[in-house]
Image (spheres, helix red, strand yellow):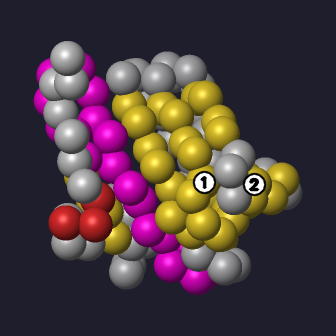
Amino acid sequence: MVDMIVDCNDLDWQDAGESYHPDTKIKVLRDDEGGRTIVLKIPKGFSMGGHTHIKNEQHFILKGQYEIDGQVYTERTYQLIRPNMTHGPFTSETGAEILVFWN
């Protein structure tokens, strides 16, 4: 049985908030005690400092690309970032849309 179905096309882009680069947008697909799932839309010129989380963070790049420590990650790239592992800084010359899971 399916617990949740979300048509991302029915969701509006929202401002991602103060912890993100200006003009960064999100669509929240899930946000509950089990974790959070979003589509993150980062603009051209995006930058974010290195940081950690207390949960697993997973990225799947849907469109565009971003760079971490000189390595460019492109569309259809997946990353698993373990808890308390510093990741970043992130930059993007082109912008990107990224499916992000925290669990």
Residue 38, labelled with which disc? none
Q: Nearer the viewer, residue 95 or 4?
A: 4
Q: Residue at x 58, y 82 (%)?
A: 44
Quarter of the image holding residue 47?
A: bottom right
Label 2 environment density (alpha carbons within 10 Å; few <14, some 14–19, many ≥20): some
Q: CA distance from mark 1 to mark 2?
A: 8 Å
Q: Name the element at disc 2.
A: strand
- 89 left or right of 18 in image: right
**Residue 103 magenta-drawn?**
no
Magenta residues, as a range?
Answer: 29-46
Residue under label 1 = 61
Q: Position of residue 87 (x, y in %)?
A: 61, 40
- 83 left or right of 28 in image: right
Whether residue 80 can be seen here: yes
Quarter of the image holding residue 30?
A: top left
Q: Nearer the viewer, residue 66 or 19?
A: 66
Q: Amino acid at mark 1?
A: Ile
**Residue 44 magenta-drawn?**
yes
Q: Position of residue 85 (x, y in %)?
A: 59, 26
Q: Residue at x 38, y 64 (%)?
A: 20
- 51 left or right of 67 in image: left
Q: How many marks?
A: 2
Q: Amino acid at mark 2?
A: Tyr
Quadrant in which the N terminus appears = top left
Q: Residue at x 80, y 58 (%)?
A: 72
Q: Name the element at disc 1.
A: strand
